[in-house]
Amino acid sequence: MRLRPLSALLLAGALCVPVLPGTAVAAPQVDLPGVPGLPGMPGLPGPDETGTPDEQALAALQVVETLVDPATSPAEAQQTLAQAGEADLTGALRDLALSMDALSPDDRAEAAAYLARPTDRRGDGYLDYEGDAVRRICTDDLCVHYVVGGASGNNVPAKDASGGAGGAGNGVPDYVDFALSTLQDVHDTYAGAGYRTPLPDGAKGGDARTDVYLGDVGSMGFYGYCTSDDDVPDDARDVPAYCVLDNDYRTGQFPTNLPTENLQVTAAHEYFHAVQYAYDAGEDGWLIEATATWAEDELFDSVDDNVQYLADSPLSHPRQSMDRDEDLAVYGDWIFFRHLTERHPAAVGGLPVLVRTIWERAGAAAGDRDEYSTQAVEQVLRRQHDVSLSESFARFADANLRPGRAYAEGRAQSYPKTPLWKRTTLTGSKRSVGAQRVYLDHLSSASQRFTPGAGLGGGWRLRLSLDLPSPTRGSAAVVTVVPTSGTPSTRVLRLDRAGDAVTRVGFSSARTSYVEVTLVNGSARYRNCSNGGTSTWPCGGRPVDDGLRFTLTGRAVPAG
């Protein structure tokens, strides 16, 4: 599911809050119902706690209840998701589908109604056609359902001028023709790149083809969502899916990009969820959303809607663990997969192979390996590219200091630079500032810049001493020398078994602009890993290597 950042919602006028140019607006504080599983609710688990199965299921149900309530504003929806440790409506619906067997019969019936399709006589609790006449148009692979002239507020624009493939005035609104052709192109691209196609859903929606419904989901701040109304078995979590897209993407609700562009990237994103569900509907949420956001940009590169999420990405927040399944950061994580696929660009059908092979290892269908997210990433990197996740993450963290140079679109799209942890200027009279310490959680980083100042214009070098946790705990370090002219040089340092290293690099102010040292906790180890639990971390577990101490000392010394 693609959720608009709150800033976009405010600018769209979705909230009755005046916004002046250049004014930062905080999300309004709201009172939420007592939802089991939310932080601050006494006696019940928070998002990092597992709780009992019935508590987990009831929490998932009540989160969805809040999200689909017409009285819930976009700001309240975002706050509910954040408090519940959910990233989006797709994740909330997915968790409800995975846990609903633990509900009481009455609650299970309510959950089934939320997961039902808009055309189901029970309604889906969020998008409901409310008895309007529903039309359907199909290709060999998928069907689009829509309403024209109904009373539910879900009508698509009625204009029928282009006629799509059927010629002018073919009886199908142009918006629907465009949606269908876009979705078919998306389907063909993923299939041509070797991905599994969405699973058939029997007679649901009319027949076994994948169904997409058009309705006014923009009124609640969503671009679209994808879910399953199938029973999700414990032993094989590959299931059919249906998706929902907005009925018009009108600019009053979606102030950025053209309506056709928003439809394109949302179709690519949501349909990728349907593809993912053919592998594992229960996979870790950060991998689900990050790779779907990566995929939308691969298919519709000129739209660049995903750039908005870089404000909540490792580029902007390097000391935040990348793999937490929470808030808009899961969308911003797409930049990690962009880094990997630009570094390992081998492609099939126009799409880099690396992401597909990760999903092949993560698959939970019969005969699949059923590896969790970071485990699958680690295995693909090691087996196919002879590099560890910690080293890859270290190179990623270093590249983010210079995104304009490191990414193909970094300069053109003004990717944000990773903020530095420290800036240090050494001079002839102040050659060292002593040991610098930082504490890092897993899959996070901190970078210090050393700049040669007055009195270091001759033959000087920078002596770096690192005292890090053992590499077995994911430690890594990268040094980049940025010259006064020419190309920066980057080196991943070799740490000893204890995590220590000493190195020297050029530090003459005549030739060196600055030196950047990036310290990395690249651990992806978790305890209590259930591969399907409900914590916000991969595999439902808890990180093993958080809060580790990293120490760095830099001293200017004469060359020689």
Image (cartoon, rainbow, N blue to C red):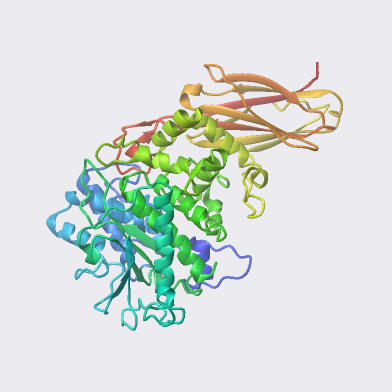
Q: Residue at the spot x=57%, y=45% of the render?
A: 315
**Residue 448 can be seen, yes or no:** yes
Position in image of residue 104 (x %, y %): 14, 54
Vertical order, 529 against 301 (above or below): above
In the rendered image, the quadrant that contains the C terminus is top right
Residue 204 horizontal side relative to residue 512, left or right: left
Position in image of residue 465 (x %, y %): 65, 21
Badge count: 0
Q: Residue at the spot x=38%, y=80% of the render?
A: 170
Q: Quadrant of residue 175?
A: bottom left
Decide which of 66, 259 is in the foreground and name it. Answer: 259
Residue 139 horizontal side relative to residue 545, left or right: left
Position in image of residue 486 (x %, y %): 77, 37
In the rendered image, the quadrant that contains the N terminus is bottom left
The residue sitting at the left extreme is: 105
Vertical order, 7 against 384 (above or below): below
Q: Quadrant of residue 423?
A: top right
Q: Residue at the spot x=46%, y=66% of the render?
A: 263
Decide which of 168, 402 is in the foreground and name it. Answer: 168
Residue 103 horizontal side relative to residue 475, left or right: left
Decide which of 58, 531 is in the foreground and name it. Answer: 531
Position in image of residue 11 (x %, y %): 54, 69
Residue 308 horizontal side relative to residue 231, left or right: right
Q: Quadrant of residue 185?
A: bottom left
